[in-house]
Amino acid sequence: MRSWLLRGLLFAVGMVVVRLVQGTLINMYETKAGLISIVLVVLFGIAAFVWGLFDGRADAEIQEDPDRRRDLAMTWLLAGLVAGVLSGFVAWLISLVYRNLYAEG
């Protein structure tokens, strides 16, 4: 499996989990919807940043010459595109059954 596809699938699963947790928490604490959404997205962004940092450092240790390192920018860009499209589609499918998950336009 290509590295960008694996990253994209893992982040898509992570985002679907975040959306489900978000829907549940917002239904429990309706007045805190904005705070819940911001905190969850920030935590997800931190997880992506940390994974990218570890990935870049591991690549730098394997290949010391910066000109010969892998093109991680394109890898992460493709992973982000896959994660965004796939998680949006799955969240929409789940919202057809689980009405508490907001997935409208």
Image (cartoon, rainbow, N blue to C red):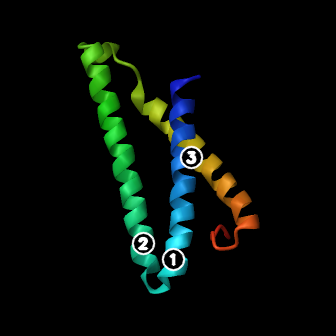
Q: Residues within 10 Å of mark 1 (few under 14, many from 20)?
A: some
Per the rendering, the mark at residue 26 is 1
Separation of marks 1 and 3 at Cα, in angstroms: 21 Å
**Lower sequence index among marks 2 and 3:** 3
- Nearer-N-terminus badge (2/1): 1
Give residue 12's mark. Answer: 3
Q: In this view of the protein, which residue sits in the foreground, 80 or 74?
A: 80
**Amino acid type, mark 3:** Ala
Q: Nearer the viewer, mark 1 or mark 3?
A: 1
Q: Quadrant of the N terminus?
A: top right
Q: Residue at x 41, y 24 (%)?
A: 71
Residue 80 versus residue 29: which sits nearer the camera? 29
On the rendered structure, is 101 left or right of 49?
A: right
Circle number at residue 36: 2
- Give the residue at the far bottom of this rendering: 31
Front residue (pair 94, 46): 94
